[in-house]
Amino acid sequence: MRSGLKAMFAEFPENRAEIVGRNQLGDYVVLHERVWRSSQSEPFDVMAVYSFDGDKCSRVEFIR
């Protein structure tokens, strides 16, 4: 997961996200995020699905 996020921020160093909504079900947390790749770009929405194993995030999927 870290290597994927590291590569994404290397490509889009100004990337930022705003959390619009959040839901949890068991070991899963789903975030509705609004994402900007740069200060000049138009935002887009994603659903980020985080899976947890105990207190550690074991996987994340982004659905656009």
Image (spheres, rainbow, N blue to C red):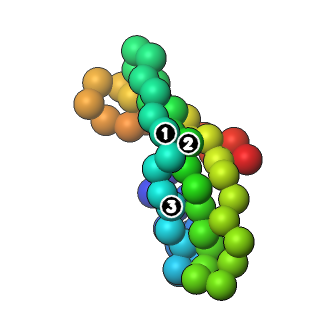
Marks 3 & 1, CB-CB < 8 Å contact: no
Q: Which residue does the numbered mark 1 point to in the structure image?
A: 21
* Sequence-wise first label, 1 or 2: 1
Residue placed farthest to the left in the image? 55
Q: Distance of mark 1 from mark 2, alpha carbons? A: 5 Å
Toward the viewer: 54 or 25?
Answer: 25
Local secondary structure at mark 2: strand
Q: Residue at x 69, y 42 (%)?
A: 63
Task: Name above or below for residue 11 compared with residue 51.
Answer: below
Secondary structure beneath disc 1? strand
Q: Label 2 sits on what residue type? A: His
- Residue 59: x, y in percent? 50, 37
10 Å neighbourhood of mark 3: few (<14), some, or many (≥20)? some
The residue where tag 3 is placed is 17
The type of residue carrying mark 1 is Gly
Q: What residue is rendered at 39% in x and 29% in y?
A: 52
x and y, in percent, of residue 35 in the image = 59, 61
Q: Are marks 1 and 2 in contact (CB under 8 Å)?
A: yes
Q: Position of residue 60 (x, y in %)?
A: 53, 41
Q: CA distance from mark 3 to mark 1?
A: 12 Å
Q: Amino acid at mark 3?
A: Ala
Q: Position of residue 54 (x, y in %)?
A: 29, 24
Circle 1 residues within 10 Å: few <14, some 14–19, many ≥20: few
Lateral position of residue 26 relative to residue 54, left or right: right
Q: Is residue 45 above or below residue 3?
A: above
Q: Is residue 60 visible?
A: no
- x 53%, y 80%: residue: 13
Q: Which mark is residue 32?
A: 2
Q: Nearer the viewer, residue 12 or 41?
A: 41
Sequence order check, earlier mark of 2 and 3? 3
Furthest-bottom residue in this view: 40
